[in-house]
Amino acid sequence: MSKIQNDEEQIRCSRISSRTRRRRSSSGVSFSAKLPDDVGGAFRDCICAVKYSTNPFSEIRESIVEVMENVGGIGDWNQMEELIYCYIALNSQEVHTFIQDAFLSLSFSTTSSSS
């Protein structure tokens, strides 16, 4: 589901926000997505927005950082695995590499800053 605009390819990707479902988005995003029913814990009340992006890596990375900050950080690998699962479940196969790269870049930046 790619879309071309201004000679730059835009890729459809889902962002996750840790704001509660009760708030309405003022960003004008016209698509929404739903987290899988088996998502629980800190991510249970997250909302999702679908958008087209010319830079899905940056969009997803920014979204991951926002969620991690708003839920008070990731406490263990099980939480990290659940967050990765959310992004993989919400996005098409063409976006999975961007998700993987975003998580890896955050893992490496966190690891190198704590050494």
Image (cartoon, rainbow, N blue to C red):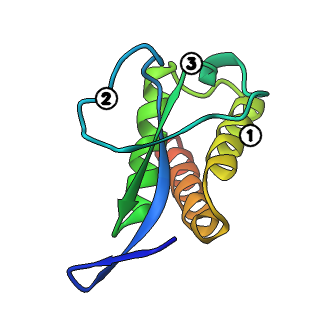
The answer for how far apart the CA atoms under marks 2 and 3 are is 15 Å
The secondary element bearing badge 2 is classed as loop
Horizontal placement of 64 versus 75: left or right? Answer: left
Callout 3 environment at 10 Å: few (<14), some (14 to 19), or many (20+)?
Answer: some
Badge 2 is on which residue?
25
The secondary element bearing badge 3 is classed as loop
Q: Amino acid at mark 3?
A: Asp
Horizontal placement of 82 versus 111: left or right? Answer: right
Q: Position of residue 112 (x, y in %)?
A: 51, 51
Q: Amino acid at mark 1?
A: Glu
The answer for how far apart the CA atoms under marks 1 and 3 are is 17 Å
The quarter holding residue 70 reads top left
Relative to 13, residue 89 above or below:
above
**Residue at point 78%, 32% (across, down):** 78
Callout 1 environment at 10 Å: few (<14), some (14 to 19), or many (20+)?
Answer: few
Q: Which mark is residue 81?
A: 1
Residue mark closest to the camera, 1 vs 3: 3
**Which of the pair 10/79 is nearer the observer?**
10
Residue mark closest to the camera, 2 vs 3: 2
